[in-house]
Amino acid sequence: MLLIVIVLATLAAGIGSVWLAAMLLRLGMGGRWRVGPQHLLSLAAGALLSTAFMHLLPEAFEDAPAHPLFATLLLGLVFFFILEKAELWHHGHEHGGHGGSSRSEGVHAHGQHDHGPEDHDPDHQPAHARGGWALLAGDSLHCFGDGVMIASAFIADLRLGVVAALSVLAHEVPHHVGDLVVLRQGKRRAALLKVSLAGAATALGGMAGYFIVGRWEAALPYFLVVAASSFVYVALADLIPQLQRRMSAAQALVQIVWLLAGMGVVMAVASFAHAAH
């Protein structure tokens, strides 16, 4: 039963986030009253930080001594930093043929360079085709890891799993918006199918996590801390830096409101899951 719940939750987070990203692109992002890239990034950062500090870490520290868990948290942050550097180097070579520096569109795929207007030039289509498969490979690996983390949370507590799946969905939406922008230079349906298949790797990670973590339940607190370190790293190293730019006081206030909304949504879902449980 738990395995079925994990598969459904990981599919909702992995593929659901792709379809939600596609819907936002179809409706149009930005504008005064529309959800824009900065809003999505703020919401995702708030959800990730709230999940890590208010749910994953407290759950982990209930069942294991503090010192080795803090060491695991530190090593996890260093590990994701190294992984990020490797991904940036790889994608930098894939997309380096576009020449010059590019302006950010506000939302880009996790672990790749920003894609500016020059990326839409038909003359660069072959480079996109080559870089697209590397993007999807990295995306699939990232989604697989998300699935393992969601499974770890579900094994610890059903409510924690729901919160973790929601947070993954929230931070994957701006991620997949960037993927779709890059890949839909040709057929949009083909781009949606490719990114959806990459998102489906979340379910594979969920199944792998169910069997791996289930076998070593004593290591569950450490899996939760690694998941928390991933969420914290993505929020602080990937999402929030994209929000740190000059803006008016009103824009900064809206950004903060969306950040707090992300935290509030996670807390509301956790409270609802607790009441239902």
Image: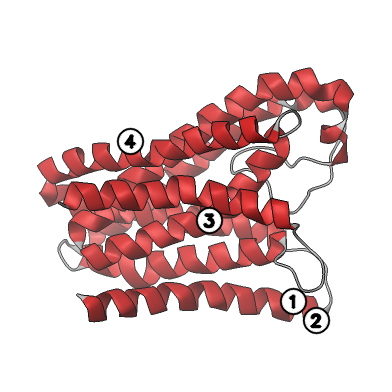
Query: At 84% from the left edge and 40% from the top edge, which residue is drawn?
Result: 102
Residue 275: x and y in percent read: 24, 81
Question: Where is residue 86 drawn, in percent x and y?
Answer: 55, 31
Question: Under tag 3, what secondary structure?
Answer: helix
Q: Kindly report the distance in space between the C-alpha atoms of the residues bearing marks 3 and 2.
A: 25 Å
Q: Is residue 210 left or right of residue 271?
A: left
Q: Is residue 23 above or below residue 129?
A: below
* Foreground pick, 15 / 264: 15
Residue at position x 74%, y 28% in the image: 186
The image quadrant that residue 251 belongs to is bottom right
Task: Mark 3: give few (<14), some (14-19) or many (20+) Cα within 10 Å.
Answer: many
Coloring scheme used: secondary structure
Residue at image position (74%, 54%) is 106
Earlier along the polypeptide chain: callout 3 or callout 1? 3
User: According to the image, label 2 marks what residue?
Assistant: 249
In the rendered structure, are the residues bearing label 1 and label 2 in contact, judged by CB atoms less than 8 Å apart?
Answer: yes
Residue bearing the label numbered 3 = 171
Picture coordinates of residue 140 (x, y %)? 47, 33
**Amino acid beneath label 2:** Ala
Category of crowding for the residue at label 2, using alpha-carbon neighbours closer than 10 angstroms: few (below 14), some (14–19), many (at least 20): few
